[in-house]
Image (spheres, helix red, strand yellow):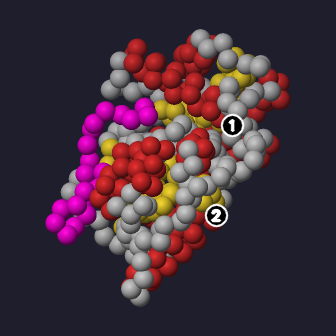
C-alpha cells in the first residue's frame, strides 16, 4: 500500500517543521508538501495530490476557515484535519470549521503541557486520525453481506436517551438535537469525544439551536425531561439514582478506550441505573468506544441503534457495535431523530395504557 500523502498548511515555519518531523516518523505517512498560507495551499493541492490536509485555523490573509470553504468547493471528499488552539477562540473556530466540512481537528501544544508530552500527544492524535480518515490498514467496514441483527427490539418504556459520538459527532449532534421538540419527555445524556472547553462551547451552540435546554454536565444535577447534558471534556459522566431522582456524576477516573469522557462509562451507568428503560444511540466516530457499554445496555434489556456507514464520517464506533451484533437497528443520520422520537413516545403511550 502506498503511504498516505499529507499537505501541511500553517503560517508558522516552526509548526510546519514540527508536524513534518512528527508525521515523517511513521513509514505509512509521507509529507508531500507544505504551504504557508491559504492561497498557496489551494495552488499546491493539484501539484502534490494529497490524501489529507492538516490546516491551521489562524493564518494571515486567507485564514483556515476561508481556505476550508474553498477546498470543499473544489475537493468535497478530501479529508481535512484542523490544527487549532486550545482556547475559547480556538474552540469556537474549530466548531465553525467542523460545520464547514472539516473532517476532524487536533489541538496545538498548550502551556499546560511539557514539550515532550505535547509533541507525543499531537503525534499520536494525528497518526490515529490520519489513518482512520484514510482507512490505512483497515478493511472497508461496509464490505460483505449486511450484518445479522440478533436482538429483537425491546418494548419497555424509555426513560432516558444516551448518545455516544466522536469523529463527525459535533455536526451529527447539530443535526440531531435541534430536531427534538420542547415537549420531549425524557432527558438526553451525551458523550462527545472533545477536550475541556470545547464541550462547553458545543453545549452552548446546541442550546442556541435546540428547543431543549442543553448544558455541559455538572455533578449532582438532577435529570429532568426536556434537558440535554453533554459530558465535560477530560471527565467521565455517569448517572445514578438518589431517592426518587436521577442525578449526574462527574469523575476523573482513568481514561477508557484512550478516552475521557468515555461512552462506555456513560452507557454502563445508564444501564445500571435505568435497567431496561434505556435507548442508546451510537453516532459516527473513530475507535470502539461504546461497544462494551452497548453490551451492558442490551444485557439489561435496553435498546441500541446506530448510525449507518454512508452517513458517518468514520464508521468505527457504530461499525464496532454492529460487528458485535449489539445494534437492533441501523439508520442514516437523518432517520435517527425521527426513530428516537417514535420509540420514546410510542413506548410511553403503551406504558400509560397499561401495556408492557
Where residue 295 sits: x, y (%)? 45, 48
Magenta span: 238-258
* Residue displayed at 58% across by 55% down: 150
Q: Quadrant of residue 279?
A: bottom left
Where residue 126 sits: x, y (%)? 56, 27
Real-space Cα distance between discs 2 and 1?
A: 22 Å
SS for dot 2? helix
* Residue displayed at 55% across by 58% down: 151
Where is the N terminus found, in terms of image quarters? top right
Give the number of the disc on residue 334: 2
Task: Identify residue for label 1.
Answer: 79
Q: Quadrant of residue 6?
A: top right
Where residue 10 sits: x, y (%)? 60, 26
Q: Is residue 182 visible?
A: no
Is label 2 or label 1 in front?
Answer: 2
Dot 2 or dot 1, earlier in sequence: 1
What is the crowding at mark 2: few (fewer than 14 residues within 10 Å), some, or many (at least 20)? some
Give yes or no for residue 345 being in the magenta stretch.
no
Give the number of the disc on residue 20: none
Mark 2–mark 1 CB contact (< 8 Å): no
Give yes or no for residue 252 being in the magenta stretch.
yes
What is the crowding at mark 1: few (fewer than 14 residues within 10 Å), some, or many (at least 20)? many
Where residue 306 sits: x, y (%)? 57, 55
Amino acid at each position: 500500500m502506498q503511504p498516505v500523502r499529507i499537505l501541511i498548511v500553517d503560517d508558522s515555519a516552526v509548526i510546519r517543521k514540527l508536524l513534518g518531523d512528527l508525521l515523517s516518523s511513521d513509514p505509512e505517512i509521507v509529507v508531500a508538501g507544505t504551504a504557508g498560507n491559504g492561497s498557496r495551499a489551494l495552488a499546491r493541492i493539484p501539484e502534490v495530490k494529497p490524501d489529507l490536509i492538516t490546516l491551521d485555523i489562524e493564518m494571515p490573509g486567507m485564514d483556515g476557515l476561508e481556505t476550508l470553504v474553498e477546498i470543499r468547493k473544489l475537493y468535497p471528499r478530501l479529508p481535512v484535519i484542523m490544527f487549532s488552539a486550545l482556547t475559547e477562540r480556538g474552540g469556537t473556530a474549530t466548531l465553525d470549521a467542523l460545520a464547514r466540512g472539516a473532517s476532524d481537528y487536533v489541538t496545538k501544544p498548550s502551556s499546560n503541557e511539557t514539550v515532550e508530552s505535547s509533541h507525543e500527544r499531537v503525534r499520536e492524535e494525528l497518526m490515529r486520525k490520519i489513518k482512520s480518515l484514510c482507512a490505512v490498514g483497515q478493511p472497508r467496514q461496509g464490505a460483505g453481506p449486511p450484518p445479522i441483527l440478533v436482538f429483537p427490539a425491546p418494548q419497555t418504556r424509555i426513560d432516558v436517551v444516551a448518545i455516544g459520538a466522536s469523529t463527525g459527532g459535533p455536526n451529527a449532534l447539530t443535526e440531531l438535537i435541534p430536531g427534538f421538540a420542547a415537549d420531549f419527555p425524557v432527558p438526553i445524556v451525551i458523550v462527545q469525544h472533545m477536550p475541556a472547553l470545547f464541550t462547553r462551547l458545543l453545549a452552548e451552540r446546541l442550546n442556541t439551536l435546540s428547543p431543549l435546554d442543553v448544558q455541559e454536565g455538572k455533578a449532582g444535577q438532577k435529570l429532568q425531561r426536556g434537558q440535554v447534558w453533554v459530558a465535560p471534556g477530560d471527565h467521565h459522566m455517569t448517572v445514578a439514582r438518589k431517592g426518587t431522582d436521577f442525578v449526574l456524576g462527574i469523575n476523573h477516573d482513568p481514561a477508557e478506550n484512550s478516552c475521557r469522557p468515555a461512552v462506555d462509562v456513560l452507557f454502563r451507568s445508564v444501564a445500571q441505573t435505568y435497567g431496561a428503560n434505556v435507548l442508546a444511540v451510537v453516532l459516527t466516530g473513530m475507535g470502539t468506544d461504546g461497544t462494551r457499554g452497548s453490551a451492558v445496555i442490551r444485557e439489561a434489556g435496553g435498546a441500541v441503534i446506530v448510525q449507518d456507514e454512508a452517513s458517518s464520517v468514520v464508521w468505527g464506533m457504530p461499525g464496532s457495535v454492529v460487528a458485535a451484533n449489539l445494534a437492533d437497528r441501523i439508520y442514516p443520520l437523518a432517520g435517527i431523530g425521527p426513530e428516537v422520537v417514535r420509540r420514546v413516545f410510542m413506548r410511553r403511550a403503551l406504558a400509560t395504557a397499561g401495556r408492557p
